[in-house]
Amino acid sequence: MKIGFIGLGIMGESMSENIVKKHDDTVYVFDFVKEKIDLLVSKGAVGCESSVELAKASDVIISMVPKSEHSMSVYKEILPVLGEGKTCIDMSTIDPSVSVEISKMVKATGAQFIDAPVVKSKPAAIAGVLGIYVGGDEAVYEAMRPILLYMGNNVIRMGDNGKGLVMKICHNAMVGQIQNGVNENLVLASKFGIDPKTFATAISYGGGQCFYLDTKNAPIAAEDWTTAFSIENMAKDINICMSLAAEMGVSMPGEANVQRVYQDALAAGYGKEDFCATYKVVRDQK
């Protein structure tokens, strides 16, 4: 079974590298940045000149691109070469309604489609221990599960097409509220001379311990905003969450506050920085 991987960004690069390491057949890769293709070729992949070339050659086509419009563009481009015997897995985090639309387009060709967005960030992608939420037919999920396990160690089917993305958006929205709580209380503690490391240790003695604080207290203390997951990507996910909430008539005032913090972070020019740089927004607001 030949696998193709489209999108070799922060996450896609390491995800595809794990497939190359673990899969016993050809792995094709494509990205608009040639240097990224060359890097994966040096690790054993076969580079392609376009998404269409990759899709023609592959039995399973995986995409990992930034936004809804990028996913739609990829699948519209490769649609003419899809058909029975091919399966598409979009691992991008996009609007669930757009993913459902893509799934209908793909299935109309005779090919199969699942959405499979991931949680955790770059270190987990490198280690192959991502969490993966799947939306799609159960039989397709079961067939693709071994491939997903090349990239993650926790894989769960959430329901039909689009449901994996609904879960991913809920996950990231919840992380945003946890993050904002950490940032606010860390700023307050700092005003009394308590440093981030000591704060994190003390919190671990009680019920407030969380993955975000455990992994981000050191970068925050060092003011190291090196990107594992960008502010602009998290802002996109939070905006999708607020749209879903409005669609379903759900009030989310806590998330609305997180959305405001992210809008302020984007306005301050922090969009390309790691999402923990929202700490600066909370710290500096009056």
Image: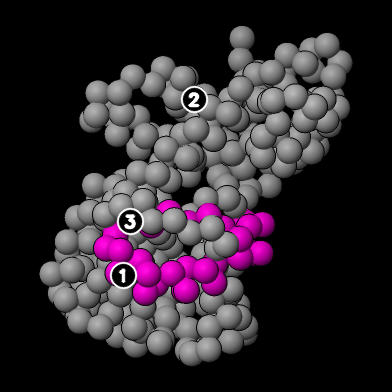
Residue 69 rendering spot, x and y as whole percentages: 30, 53
Disc with the residue nearer the chain's start (3 vs 2): 3
Image spot of residue 189 (x, y percent): 77, 16
**Element carrying mark 3:** strand
Between circles 3 and 2, the one closer to the viewer is 3
Q: Secondary structure at mark 1?
A: helix
Instruction: Choose top left, top right, bottom left or bottom right for residue 265.
Output: top right
Q: Residue at x 15, y 74 (%)?
A: 109
Q: Are marks 1 and 2 in contact (CB under 8 Å)?
A: no
Bounds of the magenta segment:
122-151
- Amino acid type for the residue under numbered disc 3: Gly
Name the image quarter holding the N terminus: bottom left
Question: Splitting the image into 4 quarters, where does residue 28 fall?
Answer: bottom left
Question: Residue 69 magenta-drawn?
Answer: no
Q: Quadrant of the C terminus?
A: top right
Q: Earlier in the sequence, mark 3 or mark 1?
A: 3
| Dot 2 amino acid type | Val
Left/right of residue 233 with respect to residue 41 in the rendered view: left
Question: Is residue 129 rendered magenta in the image?
Answer: yes
Work out how far the residue at label 3 is from the one at label 2, CA to CA, in angstroms: 27 Å
Query: Residue 135 got which mark?
Result: 3
Pointer 1 local density, CA inside 10 Å: few below 14, some 14–19, many at least 20: some
Q: Tell me if 115 is positioned left or right of 18 in this view.
A: left
Question: Nearer the N terminus, badge 1 or badge 2?
Answer: 1
Q: x and y percent of residue 68 in the render?
A: 32, 51
**Tally of marks:** 3
Judging by the rendered image, the residue that carries numbered circle 1 is 140
Q: Residues within 10 Å of mark 2 (few under 14, many from 20)?
A: many
**Residue at the image position 86 percent from the left and 27 percent from the top:** 198
Residue 258: mark in rendering: 2
Q: Tag 2's secondary structure?
A: helix
